[in-house]
Image: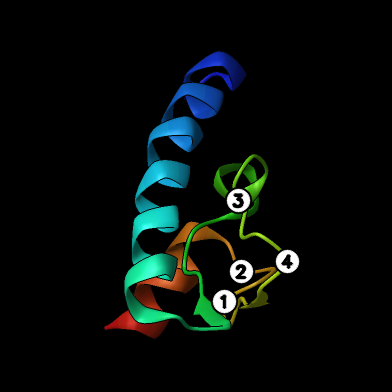
Amino acid sequence: MRIEERKEWAGIVNGQIDGILKKYQTDDIIVLAGEKYREFLDFKGRTVNVPLKGMRIGQMLKCLK
């Protein structure tokens, strides 16, 4: 996605994240998205674990299988 599309997508996802964080009252978040997709996400200061950080998409998919 282009940067404008990623910003728009992040706005939608941030709304979903807010709902989940309110519902589950959690402090730990696991994110499997790549760096460009995490760029505009707002986790409200929560601890974010990115276990596949630094991997390319092919490596991520192989690891997730």
- Name the residue tied to disc 4: 45
Residue type at numbered disc 3: Arg
Distance between the alpha carbons at the discs numbered 1 and 4: 20 Å
Query: Which circle marks residue 9 in the picture?
Result: none
Give the quadrant of the C terminus.
Answer: bottom left
Left or right of 4? Residue 57 is left
Left or right of 17? Residue 53 is right
Query: Where does residue 63 sit, x and y in percent of width and height?
Result: 41, 83
Distance between the alpha carbons at the discs numbered 4 and 3: 14 Å
Distance between the alpha carbons at the discs numbered 1 and 2: 6 Å
- Name the residue tied to disc 3: 38
- Name the residue tied to disc 2: 55
**N-terminal-most mark, 3 or 1:** 3
Q: In the picture, residue 7 is in which quadrant?
A: top right
Mark nearer the viewer, 2 or 4 = 4
**2 and 4 marks in contact (CB < 8 Å):** no
Secondary structure beneath dot 1 equals loop
Query: Where does residue 20 sit, x and y in percent of width and height?
Result: 35, 65
Mark nearer the viewer, 4 or 3 = 4
Mark 3, other Cα within 10 Å: few <14 / some 14–19 / many ≥20: some
Mark nearer the viewer, 3 or 1 = 3
Q: Residue at x 44, y 68 (%)?
A: 21
Residue type at numbered disc 1: Leu
